[in-house]
Image (cartoon, helix red, strand yellow):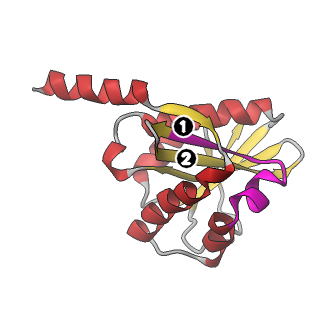
């Protein structure tokens, strides 16, 4: 039985397609993020701004969004927000609840890091919350290191991390 479950998870993970954001993905990007934010915290003004206009807020200033699809259904995403020359913020990473724990988040984050390198990033930053232990663990496992607290537009942010590329 355990082997069947692991085989099914491996099959799903291999069937997930990663690609860059398209304008028609805006609703899925918003819905995926709104689901986890409302589950753990509650939407804040900055969430509404970014999720309401990902093209204007993320893409037009030089960022990018990696999307994960299983068939025609969006199952995950992660944004790169241009902060300044060579520095991008990793933000709005989400995986659909039914696929969590299957390595999809790791694939999305690895693709996001590769995309950042292609965009000329030298440093990645992020802000998250200690309540999201699996996410913090994932970031650490891929090379992010903890930073001292810093100002954030999110009241929920209490973990700050950085990665040099």
Q: Return the x and y of residue 66 as percentages of the image width and height.
A: 62, 41
| Residue 94 shows in this picture | yes
Q: CA distance from mark 1 to mark 2?
A: 7 Å
| Residue 160 shows in this picture | no
Q: Return the x and y of residue 98 as percentages of the image width and height.
A: 31, 48
- Residue 135 is left or right of residue 61, and the answer is left
Residue sticking out furthest to the bottom = 45
Residue 116's place in the image compared with 73, above or below, is above
Q: Residues within 10 Å of mark 2 (few under 14, many from 20)?
A: many
Q: Return the x and y of residue 134 as percentages of the image width and height.
A: 41, 47
What is the secondary structure assignment of the residue under circle 2? strand
Query: On the image, numbered disc 1 is attached to which residue?
Result: 108
At horizontal 83% and vertical 48% (from top left) the residue drawn is 62
Q: Magenta span has 66?
A: yes
Residue stretch in magenta: 53-68
Comes first in the chain, label 1 or label 2: 2
Q: Return the x and y of residue 10 as percentages of the image width and height.
A: 33, 24
What is the secondary structure assignment of the residue under circle 1? helix
At horizontal 41% and vertical 67% (from top left) the residue drawn is 40
Q: Residues within 10 Å of mark 1 (few under 14, many from 20)?
A: many
Q: Between residue 110 and residue 128, name the one nearer to us.
A: 110
Residue sticking out furthest to the right = 85
Q: Magenta span has 131?
A: no
Q: Which mark is residue 63?
A: none
Q: Between residue 129 and residue 21, name the one nearer to us.
A: 21
At horizontal 16% and vertical 24% (from top left) the residue drawn is 4
> Do the numbered discs 1 and 2 sit on residues whose CB atoms are within 8 Å?
yes
Q: Which mark is residue 77?
A: 2
Residue 146's place in the image compared with 5, above or below, is below
């Amino acid at each position: 039985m355990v082997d069947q479950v692991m085989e099914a998870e491996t099959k799903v993970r291999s069937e997930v397609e990663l690609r860059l954001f398209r304008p028609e993905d805006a609703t899925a990007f918003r819905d995926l993020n709104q689901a986890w934010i409302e589950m753990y915290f509650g939407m804040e003004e900055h969430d509404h701004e970014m999720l309401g206009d990902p093209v204007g807020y993320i893409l037009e200033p030089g960022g990018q969004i990696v999307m994960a699809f299983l068939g025609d259904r969006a199952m995950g995403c992660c944004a790169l927000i241009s902060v300044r020359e060579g520095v991008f913020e990793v933000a709005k990473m989400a995986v659909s609840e039914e696929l969590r724990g299957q390595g999809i988040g790791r694939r999305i984050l690895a693709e996001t890091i590769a995309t950042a390198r292609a965009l000329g990033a030298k440093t990645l930053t992020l802000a998250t919350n200690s309540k999201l232990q699996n996410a913090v663990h994932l970031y650490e496992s891929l090379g992010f290191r903890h930073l001292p607290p810093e100002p954030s537009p999110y009241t929920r942010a209490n973990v700050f991390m950085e990665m040099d590329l």
